[in-house]
Amino acid sequence: MAHAAPTSREVARYGGPPDVFGARTHATARWAVPLALALVYGYWAAANTRYGGPITGWNVLFGFVTAIVFFVLYLGVQAVGPHVRREVHAFLWAALWGSATGFLFSLSGRGHTVLASTVLALAVAAPVFMAVFYRYYTHEDAAGHRIR
């Protein structure tokens, strides 16, 4: 005979899993994740500009400046996003990831055209927009307010 799996009272009461991490962990992750992504992005951009050559001071400076710009843009989208409609919010994330990918592609080799970088940026931005829009659309009520 089949029986229903037991659930905890907290899951049954609130309709979702309990929050494993505390508020301090979430607050730290809001800036630590973008910082880690920015450092990886800056290293990747600096490595692309070397073309396999030696590491120079200008190359390291370019990597850090690229990381700082990416970090600021990421935090900007993260801060502005909750205050705009879901379409604009999804477009901001798509624009960030599409342009970031197109920029890295333009640095990756000699002979890449602006058209090729733009096509790749749009090819990345379109699925990012669809995925993020779907997520925001499914996490709002009928009036457009985010469910927390």
Image (cartoon, helix red, strand yellow):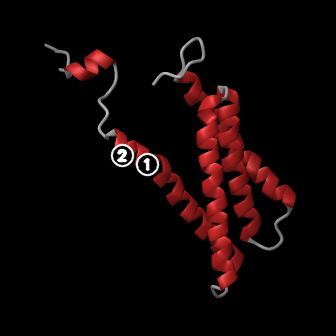
| Element carrying mark 2 | helix
- Quadrant including the N terminus: top left
Residue visible at 66% across and 49% down in the picture: 97
Residues at circles 1 and 2 in contact by the CB criterion of under 8 Å: yes
- Identify residue for label 2: 25
Callout 2: few (<14), some (14-19), or many (20+) C-alpha neighbours within 10 Å?
Answer: few
Residue visible at 59% across and 31% down in the picture: 82
Residue visible at 53% across and 22% down in the picture: 146
Give the answer, above or below, for where 102 lies relative to 49.
above
> From the viewer's perspective, is 11 left or right of 97?
left
When asked about the image quadrant of residue 56, the answer is bottom right
Give the answer, above or below, for where 37 lies relative to 83.
below
| Element carrying mark 1 | helix
How far is disc 1 from disc 2 in space, using C-alphas?
6 Å
Number of labels in the image equals 2
- Identify residue for label 1: 29
Residue visible at 67% across and 59% down in the picture: 69
Tell me the amino acid under the disc marked 1: Ala
Where does residue 112 sit, x and y in percent of width and height? 82, 66
Nearer the observer, 51 or 39? 39
Asked if one can make out residue 51 in the rendered structure from this viewpoint, the answer is no
Where does residue 135 sit, x and y in percent of width and height? 55, 30
